[in-house]
Image (tube, rainbow, N blue to C red):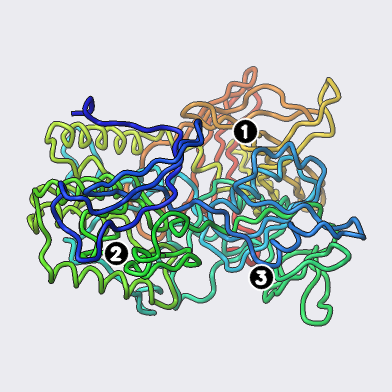
Amino acid sequence: DPSSCEFLMQCRVTNVSCCSTMPLSTDNEEANYKVEWLDVTTQRTHCRDFGGVVIASGFFHTPCMPSFLNDKINSKNDSSGKRPQILHSSQYRTHEQFKGKNVAVVGGSFSSLEIASDVSKSAARVVSILPSIPWVIPRWIYKFHPLLSSEPVGNTKTITILPSDLALYQRTQPFQGEVTELTPEMCQERHQYVQSLVGRKQRFSPLGEPTNWNEPTIVAISDEYVDLVNEEKIHAIQGRLVGINDDGSLQLDTWSQRSQWSQPATEAHDALADIDCVICATGYKPNLHNFLSSEILSTLDYDQDDKFSPLTLAFDTLHPSLPNLAFCGLYKGPYMGVMDLQARLAAKLMSGSISIEDEAYKSALKTSETMRKSSPRQQFPHFYPDLMDTLIQVLNQGDPSDCDGKFGIVIPPLYQKDERLREQCRLDLTREIKRGQDGSRMPKLVLSSILGSWSYDRKIVHLQTGKHEHVSGTVKYSKYWTRDCDEDNNTALPGVDNPVLYREDGVYEFSPTQKFDVFREYEYEVKDDALEIYFVEGGKRAHMFLSLKFVPTVEEEGGQWVKATSDHLCIKDLYSATFRVKLNGLSASEIIIKYRVKGPAKDYESTTILMPVAGQQ
């Protein structure tokens, strides 16, 4: 009954300790733990004994900075006046505060890539310093999923564009226990799988791909980062920041030169000069040592410097020597579904609804110890579905019948006991999958896949005369670009919503003796469920040329072709266009554009084949 609960707000817990010598009682009515707290409003301290305690103070609590940077931050001795501003990613608010500055972003995971992408909107120069190269995945990806249709389609599979968590967190076989250590072969399989998702774009970017496939994969989510690196809005350096010189330059221990800004090696390290601000996306530490007693911390084998898994816990929730003390969300990468199951497990144990056998505890503690000692470590200690399945089996005392997340997409509602909630979740998932298959999300995926440089070959055949003409050259699809100024003398800010600029430069062979240099520009933009193409005349957007709607396609071998058609009536001439794009993962590997043109004075067919520039196939 929520009305019987007492909620204390604006309080800070200062100490949690055992009331008596261990072993403690499993009876929730007996006093096991003494909790002391400070009322922040009144500044009064309070103390009370409790039968049970749940620790849900969060894993990402204290910003973690390299020690040499802490010294720089705390020191007021900067006679040169050249020391860069240093801040943690938790202090980052908006790109506008870095307008016109040279910014270095340190770190190789989610927040570092997103901050580097965002700050590039205002900063004069952005350098991304990565200790290791991650696989960079956008927020929406496609996988092949059985076609959901009112018509019988058998086992037909089609492109299905889903949020990355729905696409990645899927169960394809029965749960057989958590994997605590990865063999080199398992690591290679995971790298190969992620590479198949992202395609060639990252491989041929200045960022490059991870090279050591014998170690666990590192994945970061960002829609913009790789494209910004490709278009030289972000300069990526693989290495570590190891110091700051007296002249304000950064000392880098680099093993892969990836930036024009990296200077030749001086003594032991490379130097990166003219940096105004360093943003450290270097993680967090938990703060359990600030309020848990030394006795409890010793039992948990607590390591406050371990940013991976600082506690030895059964199921990341419990310890048999500390009955009625539970932890919720205290591991790297907590998910709401896991925390919900941890809370349910704590409630059942403290209420006496279930019990856990000694052997199960011992096995779970051994799993935790093995995970903490593993080397090299995975990016996160748990695969989300595996931990969910582990917890639901403990809750159900080994009976998995209540777990509906064993196959297919794994999301938290499928682990609830309420069948009505689970059924509603299934219906919502079905609608999401159907939407991912109806083509409405395809334009954005296609537009992202074609960014970069291409060579093209165009053949024009006049059907009445049989005359052939030929055009060849290069095409660049650019996402981050600006015109010199608009009519109001304002320069456009490149960003997520900027249309993509198509720039074509080539040679038109009108006849064996007549050749002309030619160029043209279009702007591509996603509007609702269509990819719209606009003419560019005199350096400015003119009227719309085509509106392309892509149709769902079924799985094919050797790459996946997607197709769209559209017509454009230009006074008396009808242009019938067909666009075909071949996808390998999230990157296009070939584009074919055909126009069938009919009119009083025109009757020709134009076929343009675009291939990645040499060296990027």
Location of mark 1 (residue): 497
- Nearer the camera: disc 1 or disc 3: 3
Q: Residue furthest bottom?
A: 267
> Which residue is at 13% across, 40% downward?
417
Q: Is residue 73 left or right of residue 111?
A: right
The first of marks 1 and 2 along the sequence is: 2
Tell me the tag on residue 375.
none
Q: Is residue 563 visible?
A: no
- The amino acid beneath tag 2 is Leu
The first of marks 1 and 3 along the sequence is: 3
Residue 407 percent location from the top left of the image: 19, 52
Up-down relation of residue 309 to residue 213 (above or below): above
Along the viewing direction, whichever of 604 and 525 lies nearer the viewer = 525
Specify few, some or many for label 3: CA neighbours under 10 Å numbering under 14, 14-19, or 20 or more: many
Location of mark 2 (residue): 313
Quadrant into which the N terminus falls: top left
